[in-house]
Amino acid sequence: MERIGIKIVVIGGGTGSFTLLSELKNYTHNLTALVNMVDDGGSTGMLRDELGVLPAGDIRQCLVALSSSPKVRELFNYRFDEGSLKGHAFGNLFMAALEKMTGSFAEAVETASEVLRVEGRVEPVTLDNVNLVMKRSDGTEIKGQFESAYAQLEPGERPYLTLDPVAKLNPDAKQAILEADLVVIAPGHLYGSLAPALIVNELTRTLNQSKAKKIYVCNLVTKPEQTSDFTVEDFAAEIERFSGIHLNFVLYNNHRPPKELIEKYAHQGEYLVEWDEKTLAKKHYKAIGKKFIADEVWTNTNESSDPIAAKRSLIRHDAERVARELMRIYFA
């Protein structure tokens, strides 16, 4: 496949970004992943606490997605399962060592990109050491990304999220947005992954200044206790609330696989996101519903190197179909 010069920025982090980036790199050599910087769970959280380094977990996933070196990809995802390093991903340790050695997380990302032979760029949305704070409707506060991501919200509750301290937008991330042809907000955990990337100071103004088409690829399934009642419209509304922009397009899956397949796809309590075509037709954005769900149940083919990946949702977007639709939007 011949790659074109279209400039695409993908905002998010985690599995949703990984899946999309892995396919988009086949379409363009001007691909930039902007990644949230609030991860404080697992290996990343331990390294933040013990070494005072910035969170590398989601950055590592995006670097691996854009890597052209299969063996090094496996190495960066390798997770120790015994000894004092149990639970740590090698890539997280590598990034921590680079940051301590150079004194710069940005330089650590750049060096890791060289080692992984990354096709494109991965940029932290901010280089500040920040933590996520969720403010509930009853006035209580939940601190930390991990705690916020698993907070049990009331039906219909829409929490307010902030970063502590206030984060400054990474200048390289800003430049990428301003130069982009498409800005794609990837599917992912709404309050734990997407919103923390969208609420960085100056991001809203930069997105509004950008002439790029702004597109949200809606989640396939809901999350228990947080988005269990969400429709496509609800997800898009929250993305707009946090980003402060009007979306141009929303891509959503409108295909219902057999019931038995759904049961294999999703974890307990997760359900396919519903949609209402009449409601979506009245929105200011163009909602495009197609079969964006993968035909096969996702299986972790590298469980020995990253057993934690096996616990993640089995449902996946068909990244090739999503990428083709993004190209249609660009050329329309």
Image (tube, rainbow, N blue to C red):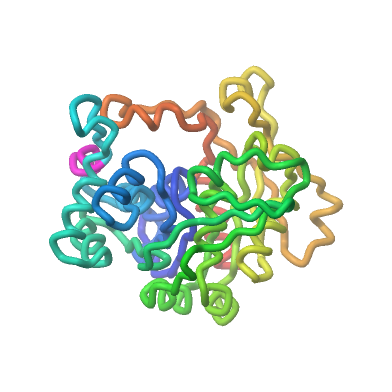
Q: Where 300 sits versus 110, above or below?
A: above
Which of these two is toward me, 94 or 73? Answer: 94
Looking at the image, residue 161 sits to the left or right of residue 57; the answer is right
Q: Is residue 75 magenta?
A: yes
Q: Residue furthest bottom?
A: 209
The location of residue 317, given as percent across then percent down, is: 54, 41
Q: How many numbered circles are shown?
A: 0
- Quadrant of the frame with the C terminus: bottom right
Q: Where 321 sits versus 36, above or below?
A: above
Magenta span dominant secondary structure: helix
Residue that appears at 41% across and 71% down: 173
The location of residue 117, given as percent across then percent down, is: 21, 55
Within the image, what quadrant is residue 216 found in? bottom right
Q: Which residues are magenta?
A: 70-76
Residue that appears at 77% across and 41% down: 155
Q: Is residue 291 magenta?
A: no
Q: Residue furthest left?
A: 101
Q: Where 224 sits versus 284, above or below?
A: above
Residue that appears at 63% across and 63% down: 242
Residue that appears at 55% across and 56% down: 133
The location of residue 291, given as percent across then percent down, is: 64, 40
The location of residue 195, given as percent across then percent down, is: 57, 57
Q: Where 290 sits versus 306, above or below?
A: below
Which of these two is toward me, 233 or 98? Answer: 98
